[in-house]
Image: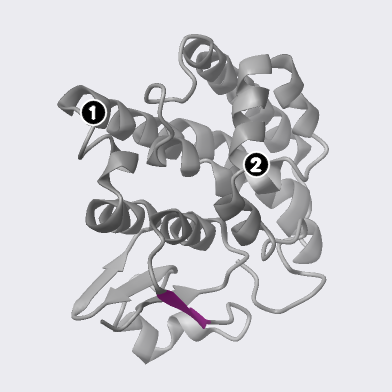
Amino acid sequence: MAPMKVYGWVVSPWMARVLVALEEAGAEYEVVPMSRSGGDHRRPEHLARNPFGEIPVLEDGDLTLYQSRAIARYIFRKYKPELLGLGEGGSLEESAMVDMWLDVEAHQHEAAVRPILWHCIINKFEGRDRDQGVVDESVRKLEKVLGVYEARLSGSRYLAGDRISLADLSHFSNMRYFMATEYAGVVDAYPHVKAWWEALLARPTVQKVMAGMPPDFGFGSSGNIP
């Protein structure tokens, strides 16, 4: 069976979400590198894969998928369903918790973190001004989110229960860049969140993917920027 293909630039947090899933699953895959600055995602051949002109895109035989969380779910359904709360040792309740916290990550956590990454890291490399008001508001939102996480993680080792799942792993890519900003110390106020984050960082799969994610999003080392 041919390895799966993943199209994108490895510094992207959305690409990293998929790469961590592939590594956790032990799946064979090939990264097809693309250049955002070169406009590869707007070329007809890529728009045929994803009409929205975004990355990552996964090809597995005749199947083509986009949207990083959907791709990660597919990978785990195929190779490692226990990371979705399914399969041996799983339950309907556990899988529902994975789904719920994955939605929290998408709609609460990323929504708070993403403006911080853009204004604190990306804007200065793209020649745009930093809006400190946006940053301050986003930090306040993140603190509220982390307070909810702290309460949850004080009673369970991971977000969906006592086993690691996609709900946890999905946070890595955005958190990696947030922790490279001057606001990384915010996490220190939440000891259970900090321990959870450190446990994610200790995973060999995460370390492998993180090696391709320089703190400056690759602006200082390559044109393959997110």
How many angstroms separate mark 2 from mark 1 (CA)?
26 Å
Q: Secondary structure at mark 2?
A: loop
- Residue 121 horizontal/vertical position (percent): 76, 53
Q: Is 67 in front, or is 2? A: 2
Dominant secondary structure of the magenta stretch? strand
State the mark number for residue 202: 2
Residue 51, visible in the rendered structure:
no
For marks 2 and 1, give the one nearer the viewer: 2
**Which of the 4 image quarters holds residue 91?**
top left
Q: Is residue 54 left or right of residue 199?
A: left
Q: Residues within 10 Å of mark 1 (few under 14, many from 20)?
A: some
- 31 in the magenta segment: yes
Q: Amino acid at mark 1?
A: Ala
Q: Is 102 in front, or is 207? A: 207
- Residue 147 horizontal/vertical position (percent): 57, 14
- Residue 85 horizontal/vertical position (percent): 27, 34
Name which of mark 2 and mark 1 comes first in the sequence: 1
The magenta segment: 29-33
The residue identified by callout 1 is 96
Q: How many numbered marks, from 0 up?
A: 2
- Residue 145 horizontal/vertical position (percent): 54, 22
Q: Amino acid at mark 2?
A: Ala
Q: Quadrant of the N terminus?
A: bottom left
Report the coloring of the rendering.
one colour
Q: Is residue 130 left or right of residue 13?
A: right
Q: Quadrant of the C terminus?
A: bottom right
Q: Is residue 50 left or right of residue 15?
A: left
Q: Is 52 in front, or is 33? A: 33
Q: Residue at x 30, y 79 (%)?
A: 49
Q: Secondary structure at mark 1?
A: helix
In this rendering, is residue 12 above or below 5?
above
Q: Residue at x 65, y 42 (%)?
A: 201
